[in-house]
């Protein structure tokens, strides 16, 4: 099994700042490591295949707009709700209207 290469997505002046961002990514399921470089800064490195997701998580780029919104997810979770409500209302309204029409026609 071939392992992916690491990509440095951001550099930080202190190791504490880099460690904080690395732990933030790890908490969200992205493996991250802090790599010191020769200039005294620290690079935040992730696997190549996780680089775009890691950039979105720490806010370096805007997330893609094609993700479904919360409203879309709620509507998709219950596609049966509207037909069931309509049938329920019809089963109540039609007999009540029929009763009232019959009552008025019978002279009541």
Image: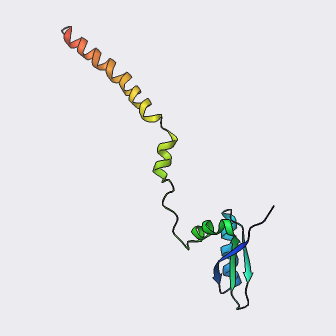
Image quarter of the C terminus:
top left
Furthest residue in direction right, as rendered: 1
Seen in the picture, residue 84 relative to 42 is either above or below; the reply is above
Q: Residue furthest left?
A: 107
Q: In this rendered view, identify the residue nearer to me: 1 or 95.
A: 1
Q: Can I make out residue 9 in this image? A: yes
- Please count the marks in the image: 0
Q: Residue 96 vs residue 52: left or right?
A: left
Q: Is residue 82 left or right of residue 30?
A: left
Q: Is residue 93 above or below residue 81?
A: above
Judged from this view, the residue extending furthest toward the front is 2
Is residue 108 in view from this perspective?
no
Which residue is at the front of the view, 103 or 45? 45
**Residue lying farthest to the top in this orientation:** 106
Residue 82, given in percent of the width and then of the height, sits at 42, 35
Residue 8: image location, x then y, percent: 67, 77
Q: Identify the residue at image location x=64%, y=82%.
A: 11
């Amino acid at each position: 099994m071939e392992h992916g290469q690491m990509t440095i997505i951001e550099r930080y002046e202190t190791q504490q700042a880099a460690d904080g961002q690395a732990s933030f990514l790890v908490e969200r399921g992205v493996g991250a490591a802090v790599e010191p470089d020769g200039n005294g800064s620290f690079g935040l490195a992730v696997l190549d295949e996780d680089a775009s997701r890691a950039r979105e998580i720490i806010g370096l780029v805007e997330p893609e707009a094609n993700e479904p919104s919360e409203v879309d997810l709620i509507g998709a979770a219950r596609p049966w709700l509207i037909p069931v409500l309509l049938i329920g209302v019809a089963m109540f309204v039609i007999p009540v209207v029929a009763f009232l029409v019959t009552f008025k026609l019978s002279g009541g």
